[in-house]
Amino acid sequence: MASEEEIKDMQESLRKLQAQVDDLSTGANRRRPGWVNFAIGFIVVFVVMFIGLGVFQFISAQ
Protein backbone atom coordinates (compact mmCIF):
# COMPACT_ATOMS: atom_id res chain seq x y z
CA MET A 1 0.00 0.00 0.00
CA ALA A 2 0.99 3.60 -0.49
CA SER A 3 2.41 5.46 2.45
CA GLU A 4 0.72 8.49 3.95
CA GLU A 5 3.24 10.82 2.30
CA GLU A 6 2.57 9.35 -1.15
CA ILE A 7 -1.17 9.71 -0.62
CA LYS A 8 -0.73 13.38 0.34
CA ASP A 9 1.45 13.95 -2.74
CA MET A 10 -1.19 12.35 -4.95
CA GLN A 11 -3.95 14.46 -3.39
CA GLU A 12 -1.91 17.63 -3.89
CA SER A 13 -1.20 16.81 -7.53
CA LEU A 14 -4.89 16.02 -8.01
CA ARG A 15 -5.81 19.44 -6.59
CA LYS A 16 -3.33 21.13 -8.94
CA LEU A 17 -4.71 19.24 -11.93
CA GLN A 18 -8.27 20.15 -10.94
CA ALA A 19 -7.25 23.82 -10.72
CA GLN A 20 -5.72 23.61 -14.21
CA VAL A 21 -8.88 21.98 -15.58
CA ASP A 22 -10.99 24.73 -14.00
CA ASP A 23 -8.77 27.43 -15.53
CA LEU A 24 -8.93 25.84 -18.98
CA SER A 25 -12.69 25.35 -18.90
CA THR A 26 -13.19 28.96 -17.77
CA GLY A 27 -11.03 30.19 -20.65
CA ALA A 28 -13.02 28.15 -23.16
CA ASN A 29 -16.23 29.99 -22.24
CA ARG A 30 -14.89 33.44 -23.12
CA ARG A 31 -16.73 35.08 -25.99
CA ARG A 32 -15.32 37.29 -28.73
CA PRO A 33 -16.45 40.91 -28.87
CA GLY A 34 -19.10 41.74 -31.46
CA TRP A 35 -16.78 43.82 -33.62
CA VAL A 36 -14.38 40.87 -33.98
CA ASN A 37 -17.23 38.66 -35.19
CA PHE A 38 -18.22 41.39 -37.66
CA ALA A 39 -14.65 41.75 -38.95
CA ILE A 40 -14.26 38.00 -39.43
CA GLY A 41 -17.60 37.78 -41.24
CA PHE A 42 -16.77 40.77 -43.42
CA ILE A 43 -13.44 39.29 -44.49
CA VAL A 44 -15.00 35.89 -45.23
CA VAL A 45 -17.76 37.44 -47.34
CA PHE A 46 -15.24 39.63 -49.18
CA VAL A 47 -13.00 36.65 -50.02
CA VAL A 48 -15.94 34.50 -51.14
CA MET A 49 -17.20 37.36 -53.31
CA PHE A 50 -13.83 37.71 -55.05
CA ILE A 51 -13.59 33.96 -55.61
CA GLY A 52 -17.12 33.97 -57.04
CA LEU A 53 -16.29 36.85 -59.38
CA GLY A 54 -13.15 35.07 -60.55
CA VAL A 55 -15.06 31.87 -61.27
CA PHE A 56 -17.79 33.82 -63.08
CA GLN A 57 -15.23 35.63 -65.27
CA PHE A 58 -13.42 32.38 -66.00
CA ILE A 59 -16.64 30.68 -67.10
CA SER A 60 -17.90 33.65 -69.15
CA ALA A 61 -14.53 34.07 -70.94
CA GLN A 62 -14.72 30.62 -72.50
Image (tube, helix red, strand yellow):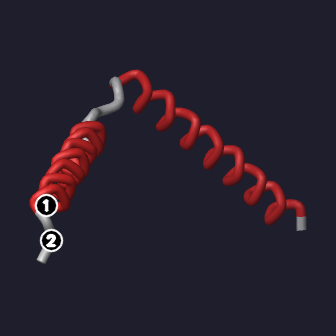
Which mark is first along the chain, 2 or 1? 2
Count of marks placed on residues: 2
The reply, left or right, for residue 38 in relation to residue 8 is right
Quadrant for residue 14, please give it.
Answer: bottom left
Residue located at (16% from left, 47% from top): 15
Whole-percent x, y for residue 32 in the image = 35, 30
Marks 1/2: CA–CA distance: 6 Å
Q: Tell me the crowding category of disc 1: few under 14, some 14 to 19, or many 20 or more residues within 10 angstroms, Cα based.
A: few
For the C terminus, the image quarter is: bottom right
Q: Marks 1 and 2: CB-CB under 8 Å?
A: yes
Q: Amino acid at mark 2?
A: Ala
Mark 2 residue element: loop
Quadrant for residue 59, please give it.
Answer: bottom right
- Above or below — where is 32 with respect to 61? above
Q: Which mark is residue 2?
A: 2
Q: Nearer the viewer, residue 16 or 27?
A: 16
Residue located at (50% from left, 35% from top): 40
Q: Amino acid at mark 1?
A: Ile
Residue located at (25% from left, 39% from top): 23
Q: Nearer the viewer, residue 34 or 1?
A: 1
Whole-percent x, y for residue 17 in the image = 25, 51
Residue located at (75% from left, 59% from top): 55
Q: Tell me the crowding category of disc 2: few under 14, some 14 to 19, or many 20 or more residues within 10 angstroms, Cα based.
A: few
Check the image and name the residue furthest to the bottom.
1
- Above or below — where is 13 with respect to 46? below
The residue to which callout 1 is attached is: 7
For the N terminus, the image quarter is: bottom left
